[in-house]
Amino acid sequence: MILLIYISLLLFSCTPNPIEKRRQITKSIKTTTIYLKAPAYKSFSQFKNDTLHYLEYNFEQRKHYYTDRRLGFLLKELELPVFSYHVSQGYKFKGGCDPSPNDSIATISFTLEKEVSTFEKFDRRIRPNVLVVKLKPFQADSALLLSKKYSQTKIRWSKEVENYYADKTIEEVLLIQKSPTK
């Protein structure tokens, strides 16, 4: 009789069954990178050797096409020679060519014309041909060694340097803006 009362209480009671384990609801979020169809790439010759318009169209207007891709992918499309490059601040690094090994690098700027031309354009408040690529930050240790190795040579952007940076991930592509007027 007691057993019958106990079973009936379990079956018909309003309180949850103490033997039954409650299920925990978990949420799962999946992220997917979608590459939107970017405007078609145009060769440098289609711009009649107008470097700035070539950079604006292919890299500034199509910058979302390069997001989350490797820097090597962008460099394969770039038809212009890189005269020099500069690495810039990470979360700690304050800028310049020689970060300390404990800092991180977040951007790399490609000078696509001779340095003299770039400085003349800044002086005249004209937009220079400098492509800035914001990268996912990474440690500066090897970059520091490469920077020192090629800092005194005529060719700062060597195949070794290109190969080192080729696997870094792009966050954003920018062009240097016009200098502010005085």
Image (cartoon, helix red, strand yellow):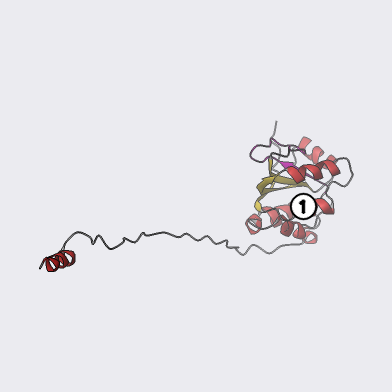
Any part of residue 80 in sight: yes
Q: Which image quarter: residue 127? A: top right
The quarter of the displayed image where residue 118 is located:
top right
The spot of residue 137 in percent (x, y) is 66, 46
Q: Residue at x 50, y 61 (%)?
A: 30
The residue tagged 1 is: 164
**Image quarter of the N terminus:** bottom left
Residues 162 and 75: in front is 162
**Residue nearest the observer in this picture, 178 or 142:** 142
Query: Is residue 128 visible in the rendered structure shown here?
Result: no
Residue 132: percent from left, percent from top: 71, 47
- Return the x and y of residue 114 as percentages of the image width and height: 85, 44
116 with respect to 78 (left or right) = right
> In the picture shown, does residue 127 fall above or below 162?
above
Q: Amino acid at mark 1?
A: Tyr
Vertical placement of residue 167 versus 95, above or below: below
Secondary structure category for the residue under label 1: helix
Q: Which residues are magenta?
A: 83-100
Above or below 17: residue 157: above
Q: How far across and down, in percent of the image, does residue 13 sit?
A: 16, 62
